[in-house]
Image: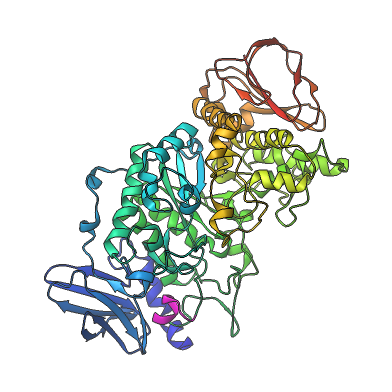
Amino acid sequence: MKKLIMAGMTVLMMACQGENQAFHYDEVTYSPRETVFKLFAPADAACSVVVGSDSIPMKLGKDSIWTAKVKGDRKSQQYEFIVNGQSSPGVFAKAVTVNGKKGVVVDLKDTDPEGWETDRHVLRPYQDMMVYEMHHRDFSIARPDAKYPGKFLALTEPWAVEHLKELGINAIHILPSYDFGSVDETRLNEPQYNWGYDPVNYNVPEGSYATDPYSPEVRIREFKQMVQSLHKAGISVILDVVYNHTFDIEHSNFQKTYPDYYYRKTEEVYSNGSGCGNETASEQPMMRRFMIESVKYWINEYHIDGFRFDLMGVHDIETMNAIRKAVDEIDPTILIYGEGWSAGQCAYPQEKLGIKANISQMPRIAAFSDEIRDGLRGPFDDDTKAAWLGAGIRIFKSSDLVAFKESIKFGIVGAVAHPQVDMTLVNYSKKPWATEPTQMMSYVSCHDDMCLFDRLKTSLPGVSKEELIRLDLLAQTAVFTSQGVPFMLSGEEMLRTKKGVHNSFESPDSINHLDWNNKEQYPQVFNYYKGLTALRAHHPAFRLGKAELVRKHLEFLDAPEKTLVFRLKDHAGDDPWRNIIVILNANRSSVEVSIPQGRYTQVCVNGVIDEKGLGEIEGGSVTVSAQSALFLHD
């Protein structure tokens, strides 16, 4: 087997590198006259396809592509490929039966909702994006007036769209929405929950989020209706893609069609850089081709506007750049970002992987900044440790406070080189890794950890809820004034809690659901978040987009140890405000901060934001309330 794979490598590489190749290496092409089935499988395999009640032998062509042409109208018939006795729907199935066991022949035009032909991508410059990370079930399962709780269609309902528009975010990052393995679609009347990072069929929407998982067309149509609804509201849709591993190896469609081709091994042991039992081999020509074609398919068929790559550090740089190039040929404004790390050691040279340190080699691909995240709230691996946000409450060594602050400054500038950021003091990274600020995702919480309120509460025991709220708002102020692309977890705008659970990937709805009562209970939180998004949307100084502009217009001012002050000067980004001063105060009491002389309008004071102004003051020295931000402009 190993010799056959190596022997075919040169031919496969040539096939994959060719421009605009027509085949996907495993596809089903329907017409009323005949359906053509193609499969990438070993040249020495026994391959057939069972369509309905007919079993048809497949013929080997070039590049290890097996083909069968089945006469007659086969629409709605089930099929499965048989490779050496192993059955699967193939790796590129576009429609499947319940739980994804078999493929189904469909005419995708039949799945288009009314008006789909006029639906368009909602695209904007990367620096203008404000991303809201959402799990379908979390968002709507406990909403009292939801007609489709926990389903794709929840995002077509007026209450959902109105909330997102009111909040002011403009991009939805939906957690894995392809067909995944951990939820049994035949038992949806029973409590089941999972984030979905266990891929089965990468190119089919998940059945448990559809109103009828038994209908192959319904899940496709309802996913499109969701996208259409968000697009009408001016909101981009970003898909969380998990190409770095499969649910398992033995039962994966990859393994059933071409054993051991798609996975990395260390000698005879499967490598586990994903932390999930296996890691895929993106450097293999046909795995690379699979990823490229899959991304293109989601763009063209489902009108997806962006992609978040789970554990992007498992994938090789060449593949990520090839994906970026293929996407650019469709629309260069489609956003691509990912986790710039792996979960374990990969069986591939680190210098060739898409880790954060190598982002400069992947133009216009972004990575998450754990520097600003952990500088604000503390490290991922210890929920009890606080950082800069707790500086007024916990006792830290001066060197630690300096490191926290410098790490936040690094995030504020968007992870690019800046003369006022001392990289020797920044946590995790000792040199700038972004070439442009749009290559950095700025965040303080996401699905994969405690939510912000829980993290603050755990790391600062005994602190009052009022203080926790102030620190929550202060944290997101740093995120949304960063020159990176701001990213927030859904529900944070309502002071979300998961009752202290760190890793809620399979916790019940009682832990993961959004409590919509919180929106009424904590209106000051929602209003502040709404104010942050509005400030960023209305003022280009906060989203300059270019490293040279950041270095020219953003300067840090001298400030006490537990405060951070920066100025966006000289109409940065042609902003109507000439100079904007942002002061972040982590102290438990108010502080006096020196600023340049002048007459300023306050627009953010002690947890309240109002662009029209909250009073005027003379510069020189200003008072900043405890654990809060102050914004001024002249």
- Say if the magenta span includes residue 253: yes
- Say if the magenta span includes residue 400: no
Residue 528 picture location, percent across and down: 59, 29
Q: In the depicted view, which residue is nearer to us: 491 or 261?
A: 491
Indicate whether 140 appears above or below 602: below
Q: Is residue 168 left or right of residue 613?
A: left
Residue at the spot 45% in from the left edge and 37% down from the top edge = 164
Q: Which residues are magenta?
A: 250-257
Residue 531 picture location, percent across and down: 55, 27
Residue 214 picture location, percent across and down: 31, 67
Indicate whether 67 appears above or below 204: below
Locate residue 420: give its quadrant: top right
Residue 374 picture location, percent across and down: 71, 47
Q: In this figure, which colouring scheme has been used for the structure? A: rainbow
The rendered magenta stretch, by its main secondary structure, is classed as helix
Indicate whether 400 appears above or below 584: below
Q: Is residue 64 left or right of residue 335?
A: left
Residue at the spot 87% in from the left edge and 41% down from the top edge = 395
Q: Is residue 92 left or right of residue 617?
A: left
